[in-house]
Image (cartoon, rainbow, N blue to C red):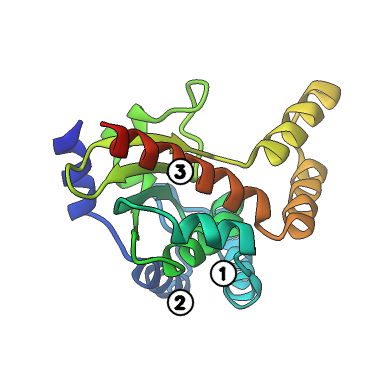
């Protein structure tokens, strides 16, 4: 696993590089990923607008900021993502803000379709759902846990909708975007901060 993580890190983007890569592809009417379609390019365009807005508006809560400042160990946040993914557009700016808030965190992003081996290690109920965050100990490159593809509240919304209607349609996606808008990234921050604290405590105790 350590060599897989090392290979993935060698194939990774910083947040700025990731954003620039998506923007450059869109100029040519393309999206990230091995599949190309008008829909995926459309979603990528919408997501770029969302990420631009979130980059300016996301604020780390005082509680989460305190937890981040209290980290003792250095971690890499290795995230599987794609530019067309609606959840990733809502979550990546939040993770980036968290990484910017402390020198104990470094964000690295890899594209799902270019990293099959890593994705297959972190499936969600057998599916290649993204974004998926792998928490990596910076010193040893050992995986210390994972998170994603959605905060618990967003995951429950989708699960309940599918149970009620049998499908995930456009209305479900609209409801999901409303949930993210109302949540302001706070659930994502809190859940990832908890993951970090738990890993930190295990490493220190070890």
Q: Is residue 174 placed above or below 25 in the rendered structure? A: above
Is residue 38 visible in this depiction of the protein? Answer: no
Labelled disc at residue 48: 1
Sort mark 2 into few (<14), some (14-19) or many (20+) by Cα contacts within 10 Å: few
CA–CA distance between discs 1 and 3?
A: 31 Å
> Mark 2 or 1, which is nearer the eye?
1
Q: Are marks 1 and 3 in contact (CB under 8 Å)?
A: no
Labelled disc at residue 203: none
Foreground of the two, 1 or 135: 135
The residue beneath circle 2 is: 27
Question: Within the image, what quadrant is residue 170 found in?
Answer: top right
Q: Residue at x 58, y 53 (%)?
A: 189
Q: Residue at x 81, y 31 (%)?
A: 161
Q: Is residue 46 placed above or below 196 in the rendered structure? A: below
Q: Secondary structure at mark 3?
A: helix
Foreground of the two, 78 or 202: 202
Q: Residue at x 64, y 68 (%)?
A: 50
The residue beneath circle 3 is: 197
- Quick check: 104 left or right of 61? left
- Find the residue positioned furthest to the right: 164
> Mark 1 or 3, which is nearer the eye?
3
Query: Nearer the N terminus, badge 3 or badge 2?
Result: 2
Sort mark 3 into few (<14), some (14-19) or many (20+) by Cα contacts within 10 Å: some
> Mark 3 or 2, which is nearer the eye?
3
Query: Nearer the N terminus, badge 1 or badge 3?
Result: 1
Q: Secondary structure at mark 2?
A: helix
Q: Is residue 121 placed above or below 74 in the rendered structure? A: above
Q: Are marks 2 and 1 in contact (CB under 8 Å)?
A: no
Question: Within the image, what quadrant is residue 5 found in?
Answer: top left
Q: Secondary structure at mark 1?
A: helix
């Amino acid at each position: 696993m350590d060599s897989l993580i090392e290979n993935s890190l060698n194939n990774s983007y910083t947040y700025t590089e990731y954003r620039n890569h998506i923007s450059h592809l869109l100029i040519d009417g393309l999206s990230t990923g091995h599949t190309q379609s008008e829909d995926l390019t459309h979603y990528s365009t919408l997501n770029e607008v969302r990420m631009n807005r979130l980059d300016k508006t996301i604020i780390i809560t005082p509680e989460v900021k305190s937890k981040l400042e209290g980290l003792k160990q250095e971690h890499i946040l290795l995230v599987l993502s794609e530019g067309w993914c609606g959840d990733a557009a809502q979550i990546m700016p939040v993770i980036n803000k968290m990484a910017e808030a402390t020198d104990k965190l470094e964000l690295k992003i890899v594209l799902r379709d270019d990293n099959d081996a890593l994705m297959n290690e972190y499936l969600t109920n057998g599916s290649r759902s993204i974004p998926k965050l792998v928490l990596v100990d910076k010193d040893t490159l050992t995986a210390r846990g994972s998170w994603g593809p959605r905060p618990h509240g967003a995951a429950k919304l989708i699960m309940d909708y599918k149970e009620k209607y049998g499908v995930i349609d456009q209305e479900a996606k609209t409801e999901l975007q409303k949930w993210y808008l109302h949540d302001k990234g706070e659930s994502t921050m809190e859940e990832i901060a908890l993951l970090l604290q738990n890993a930190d405590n295990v490493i220190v105790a070890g």
